[in-house]
Image (tube, rainbow, N blue to C red):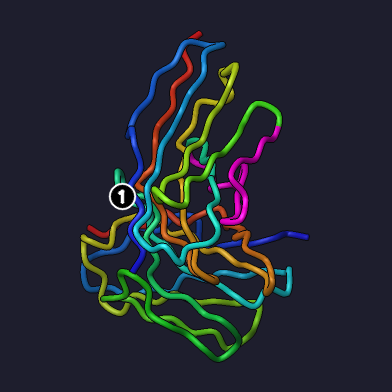
Amino acid sequence: NAGVTQTPKFRVLKTGQSMTLLCAQDMNHEYMYWYRQDPGMGLRLIHYSVGEGTTAKGEVPDGYNVSRLKKQNFLLGLESAAPSQTSVYFCASQGQGSNEQFFGPGTRLTVL
Amino acid sequence: GENVEQHPSTLSVQEGDSAVIKCTYSDSASNYFPWYKQELGKRPQLIIDIRSNVGEKKDQRIAVTLNKTAKHFSLHITETQPEDSAVYFCAASIGYKLSFGAGTTVTVRA
């Protein structure tokens, strides 16, 4: 079992460029999440999904879009990157009936 | 939504001493309280959790206590070791959503 994986691990963008971050899990988990981590601010929820084909906004959704076309994948998109989106992005998944969230290794994104 | 506050933001302890991190939460409906440890450059990993129907839980050198009336919970690490140096996050959950504290950077001095 690979658990939760994320691609890419690192990315540098210029302001205005777009990109998609991919999260994949092989644990058959229903719930998936995207967080951003900034110094001194903990983990903040961007978007989440409670099942294939469903998505919902979290605490800081502006500037991001998501899709969950397959149960095992959760994509995070930035349509027009801004320097304020420089951060480390973590994906997580959780099984139905369980409370534990399992995190991916993270993607470090820099927007110049 | 749920608001979780965590203190202190940094904690330096002598090896062998105890470390205590405290968190408060705002929503009395929260019923699950995990603690995650994140080493430098790594992903957060669950180290211990407690549910709202339990007051205390221990796992070797770590323990968590919960006071539902006061809406606060704490992490206790005894006999600290260099490998305990990391950032620790508390969180509170209603259903399937977690709200995290801002984190505590723990440094264990040799």
* Image side of residue B11 versus residue B15, left or right: left
* The stretch drawn in magenta includes residue B30: no
- B87 in relation to B102, above or below: above
Out of A104 and B64, give the one closest to the viewer: B64
Q: Residue at x 47, y 70 (%)?
A: A21
Q: Which residue is mark 1?
A: A41
* Image side of residue B47 versus residue A90, left or right: right
Out of B6 and B71, give the one closest to the viewer: B71
Local crowd at mark 1 within 10 Å, few (<14), some, or many (≥20)? few
- B17 in relation to B99, above or below: above
Which quadrant of the rendered structure holds the N terminus of chain B? bottom left
**Most distant residue in the top direction:** B110
Q: Secondary structure at mark 1?
A: loop
* Image side of residue B28 versus residue B110, left or right: left
Quarter-wise, where is residue A43 in the image? bottom left
Out of A74 and B21, give the one closest to the viewer: B21
Query: Which portion, as a residue range, is magenta?
Result: B41-59
Give the chain letter at badge 1: A
Quarter-wise, where is residue A68 in the image? bottom right
- A37 in relation to A75, above or below: above
Q: Residue at x 54, y 76 (%)?
A: A74
Out of A32 and B89, give the one closest to the viewer: B89
* Image side of residue B104 versus residue A111, left or right: right
**Most distant residue in the bottom direction:** A53
Residue A39 at x, y percent in the picture: 31, 44
Q: Amino acid at mark 1?
A: Met
Q: Residue at x 47, y 38 (%)?
A: B74
Residue A100 at x, y percent in the picture: 63, 59
